[in-house]
C-alpha cells in the first residue's frame, strides 16, 4: 500500500508570525476552524499542508533535524524576490547540477529553496 506525506506539524509559539511568513513568502493560504487551536496552511499547488500547533510551555522549537524544502525553478530569482519582501536567504550553494539556499522561519525552523527536485 502506498502512503504519501501530505502534512507536517510545526510547533510554534509564534503562530501569527508563522502564518504571515508562509503566506507572504511561499503563497500558502490560511484555514482555521472555530474552536481548533491548530492553524492549517495549504500550499498554492501540490505539496504538503503545514499544521501550526501551539508549542507547549518549555517545548523547544526550531529543531535543526528538520528542514522544509520548497521546489523552485529559479532559486536565484526567488531569493531576490524574497529579499524584497523581507526574507533573506543565505548564500547560494551549488550541488551536482542544482542550486539551493537556506533561511529560517519565525520559529527557527530551517527552510530551503532548491532546484534539485522538480515539481510534479
Image (cartoon, rainbow, N blue to C red):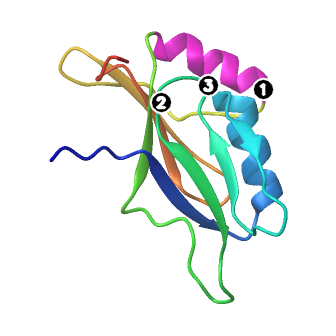
- Which numbered mark, 3 or 2, is in the foreground of this view? 3
Q: How many marks?
A: 3
Disc 1 element: loop
- The quadrant the C terminus occupies is top left
Give the number of the disc on residue 85: 1
- Which numbered mark, 1 or 3, is in the foreground of this view? 3
Give the number of the disc on residue 91: 2
Q: Which residues are magenta?
A: 74-85
The answer to whether 50 appears left or right of 39 in the picture is left
Check contact, mark 1 vs mark 3: CB within 8 A.
no
Q: Earlier in the sequence, mark 1 or mark 2?
A: 1
Residue density around tag 3, few if under 14, some if 14–19, many if 20 or more, within 10 Å: few
Q: Earlier in the sequence, mark 1 or mark 3?
A: 3
Q: What residue would you read off at disc 3?
A: 44
Residue 80, percent from left and from top = 64, 16
The residue at 15%/47% (across/down) is 1
* Residue 92 highlighted magenta (yes or no): no
Q: Nearer the viewer, residue 80 or 3?
A: 3
Residue 84, percent from left and from top = 77, 21
Amino acid at each position: 500500500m502506498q502512503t504519501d506525506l501530505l502534512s507536517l506539524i510545526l510547533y510554534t509559539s509564534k503562530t501569527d508570525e508563522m502564518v504571515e511568513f508562509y503566506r507572504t513568502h511561499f503563497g500558502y493560504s490560511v484555514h482555521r476552524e472555530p474552536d481548533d487551536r491548530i492553524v492549517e496552511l495549504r500550499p498554492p499547488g501540490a505539496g504538503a499542508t503545514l499544521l501550526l500547533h501551539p508549542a507547549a510551555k518549555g517545548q523547544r522549537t526550531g529543531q535543526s533535524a528538520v528542514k522544509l524544502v520548497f521546489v523552485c525553478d529559479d532559486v536565484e530569482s526567488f531569493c531576490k524576490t524574497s529579499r524584497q519582501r523581507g526574507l533573506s536567504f543565505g548564500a547560494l550553494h551549488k550541488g551536482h547540477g542544482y542550486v539551493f539556499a537556506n533561511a529560517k522561519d519565525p520559529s527557527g525552523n530551517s527552510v530551503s529553496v532548491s532546484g534539485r527536485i522538480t515539481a510534479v
